Amino acid sequence: MNKPQEVLTEVRGRMGLITLNRPAAMNALSLSMIRALTTCLLAWRDDPQIAAVAIRGSNQAGPFGAFCAGGDIRFFYQALQEGDPATEDFFTEEYTLNHLIHSYTKPYIAFMDGVVMGGGMGISQGASHRLVTARSKLAMPETLIGLFPDVGGGYFLSRCPGYSGEWLALTGTTLGASDALALGLADHCLDEHRLAQAWDALAQIDPGNAVDLAQWLLTFSVAMNAGRVWAREQIDDYFSLNSVADIVRALEADASEWSQLTLQQLRQRSPLMLHVAFEQIRRARQLSLAKDLRMERDVMRHCFFPRHLARSAGQTETAEGIRALVIDKDNTPVWNPARIEDVTPDMVLPFFDSPWAAHCHPLCALN
């Protein structure tokens, strides 16, 4: 029995159309999917007959309903256990794809319907048109599995208003459409009941014409105010502090429901990776996208092979987080260190030392 294609492409009119077709895994990205997307986007970028590109996900019932739940973390876990170097290729090629999307020279329209997490954010945040629906669920939940918000997360989260980027990076909070609009992580809201109609209508216009595209958006968008994110003042008050330990101490001193809920979220995450993610967002505020992706590639190498911690790949926070949440599903990861207060700078700062010389960094060609 032939395995179904995980990335479906077609051309209608002047539109290049992409459907992620791995619904059983909520379209989690495999290395083969990343390569198929990159090959397709490069070809269409240089094809004068293609004026714009649109991308959507699919669920078990058909198109839409789920965009992309992230990277294939079961693959990561197996690779960690076996010492498989394929993870090196995965992240290098995924980040190259993220950069390609952010720098794409034609309109790139992302239908961010349903779950949009991790790697799904990586292939949508660089879009010229980021379209959400009332059922969109956006998040960067990596600290829960012993990772950090990569795929350019340092770049786009650090540019969210105030200190909401630190809040999202550390807590992994899931956003709906209105909050995504308010924090600058989405541009327009579409009626989920008219997505198929909107998709088909793209073939009937000249998507390279800004007026035609604007009229298309006007036809299918629905009014959804970019409301005020709940507790924005508290987010800025606490997540502007100078360290994760400072944030936790301040939250502990506040008996409000929001503070205690936020504290509970942080206590569930990898203490080590909370500190790494915090440092990542603070550094990324000053970085271009290309420099941020190079930094994230450095950090990811150390996540999988943390030599400065004298741990094997199978002893990493990442291996333990995936084991607890996805493999054994006991939801009781044994983090090392176990407490946020026990993480030291000597554990955190080496994550940001590049294992490569600048001229041979795997992402040295990005600019």
Image (tube, rainbow, N blue to C red):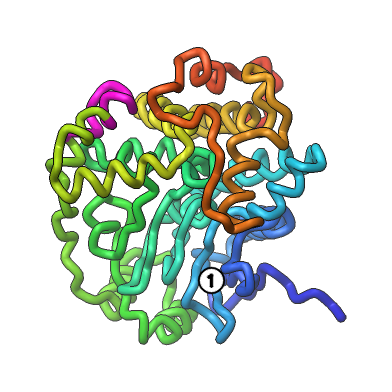
In the image, residue 23 lies in the stretch drawn in magenta: no
Q: Which residues are magenta?
A: 237-248
Q: Between 192 and 168, which is closer to the camera in this rendering?
A: 168
Give the amino acid type for the residue marked by disc 1 in the picture.
Gly
Q: Is residue 287 visible?
A: no
Mark 1 Cα shell of 10 Å, populated few (<14), some (14-19), many (≥20): many
Question: Quadrant location of the N terminus?
Answer: bottom right
Q: What residue is at 54 percent from the left and 52 percent from the top? A: 119
Q: Residue at x 69, y 69 (%)?
A: 6
Q: Which residue is mark 1?
A: 57
Left or right of 235 on screen, residue 315? right
Q: Residue at x 76, y 44 (%)?
A: 79
**Quadrant where the C terminus is found in the figure:** top right
Q: Position of residue 87 (x, y in %)?
A: 72, 42
List x then y, in percent, for residue 190: 32, 74
Residue under the point 58% across and 82% down? 60
Q: Could you say where residue 178 lies in the image, as x and y percent from the top left?
A: 23, 63
Asked if one can make out residue 348 in the rendered structure from this viewpoint, the answer is yes
Q: Name the image quarter holding residue 139.
A: bottom left
**Residue nearest the observer in this picture, 134 or 276:** 276
Majority secondary structure of the magenta segment? helix
Query: Which is more toward the observer, 366 or 2?
Result: 2
Residue 204 x, y percent position in the rendering = 45, 82
Compare residues 226 and 24 and report the one nearer the observer: 24
